[in-house]
Amino acid sequence: MLKASSVGVLALLAASAVQAEDVVRIGHVAATSGAIAHLGKDNENGARMAVEEVNAKGLVIGGKRYRLALQAEDDAADPKQGTVVAQKLVDAKVHGVIGHETSGTTIPASRIYFNAGIPQISPSASNPQYTRQNFNTTFRNIANDEQLGAALARYAVQIGKAKNIAVIDDRTAYGKGLGDEFIKNVKRLGGDARIVSQQFTTDKATDFNAILTAIKRTKPDLIFFGGMDAVAGPMLRQMKQLGIKANFMGGDGMCSDSVPRLAGDGMSDDQVICAEAGGVEASQQKGMDDFRVAYRRKYGIDVLTYAPYTYDAVLTMVDAMQQAKSPDPAVYLPFLAKIRHKGVTGTIAFDKRGDVQDGVLTIYTFRGGKRHRLTVMK
């Protein structure tokens, strides 16, 4: 006969086992250390908001109650670390993954998730290659670099009337991909605009005098940068030191309020133009505004870039599970592929590759140290 204490222990173990079965575990990966940790934490904050809201309302899938748990990991924007983290999440048997943050980590990690049959939604990786690997587990809920590069080129040439354009990229999957798409579209648009210089740096560089001096000789009226805000800010400072008065343009990686802080007195109002690979049209603006208010109330800081998209990615994945009546990746994956989820960033639906349908882009400038929205484009 078992002692009362033994019965109690067995009961606790049984209860723990039941509780473990009732948890839906979502992985989230971003660079929460290193130069772009502020952007990675912004993504993670959006995911945590979604998880907490789901649990507060109560998560029911197929008539059964679950608790949603977030397993947040740091890949430091390093591709090797990204694959290590991906395998860690697979070994933990997560039901889905939100991330990674950067294209350079998302692309190699995506094969690991595909081999394990785990759905993945990136809310910020924009390189087209991510969804062109024929992996049925890969999705993203922002526009890709083809759309981003085309929109920025149109704005530069048709609205900004740029003539002499220099291009710098940081040689990452994101920076190179965006720079290549921008150049391709400037050439496609034709007219008077021309690429007068193409230079390269790294995502960890701090000294740009050599490439900027080479660019200065070409007398550009616009410098396009494919890279992140941690590099863009110091680059703007050095442009001013060298007397380069060109406008400065880039993508979502440098489209945060950190740029004015990092640039110091190196940038002037309306000098910098950037695009966020997302955004909402006027009819959807209230939902985005409400999210930003809730985010600030919770964290005491403003949204930087992709927290709303991370938030929506989590809720889109949960919606697919509820429609499938199962959190089993093999069961809900077909429902995710056909989802139409109404989120704060608009209605999320994916094409056959996993790219978001009807993705929009928002063009910003900076005035008084703050982002100022100029227009929404497709």
Image (cartoon, rainbow, N blue to C red):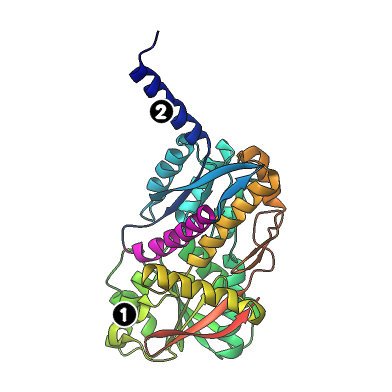
Within 10 Å of the Cα at label 1, are there few (<14), some (14-19), or many (20+) other Cα atoms? some
* Residue 315 horizontal/vertical position (percent): 58, 57
Within 10 Å of the Cα at label 2, are there few (<14), some (14-19), or many (20+) other Cα atoms? few
As shown in the figure, which amino acid type bears the numbered disc 2? Leu
Residue at disc 1, secondary structure: helix
Task: Locate residue 131 relative to residue 235 in the image: left or right.
Answer: right
Q: Name the residue beneath numbered marker 2.
A: 12
Check the image and report above or below for 240 versus 103.
below
Whether 54 is among the magenta residues is yes
* Residue 116 horizontal/vertical position (percent): 55, 36
Q: Which of 29 and 12 is in front in this view?
A: 12
Q: Which of 89 and 164 is in front in this view?
A: 89
Q: Name the residue beneath numbered marker 1.
A: 261
Task: Locate residue 201 relative to residue 374 in the image: left or right.
Answer: left
Whether residue 147 is visible, yes or no, is: yes
Check the image and report above or below for 296 versus 364.
above
* Residue 79 horizontal/vertical position (percent): 41, 50
Residue at disc 2, secondary structure: helix
Residue 285: image tag = none
Q: Give the range drawn in magenta.
A: 35-56
What residue appears at the point 64 percent right and 59 percent down from the top-left corner?
Answer: 355
As shown in the figure, which amino acid type bears the numbered disc 1? Arg
* Residue 69 horizontal/vertical position (percent): 47, 47
Q: Earlier in the sequence, mark 1 or mark 2?
A: 2
Mark 1 vs mark 2, CA separation in Å? 53 Å
Helix, strand or loop: magenta stretch? helix
Query: Tags 1 and 2 in contact by the CB under 8 Å rule?
Result: no
Q: State which quarter of the image contains the N terminus.
A: top left
What residue appears at the point 57 percent right and 49 percent down from the top-left corner?
Answer: 59
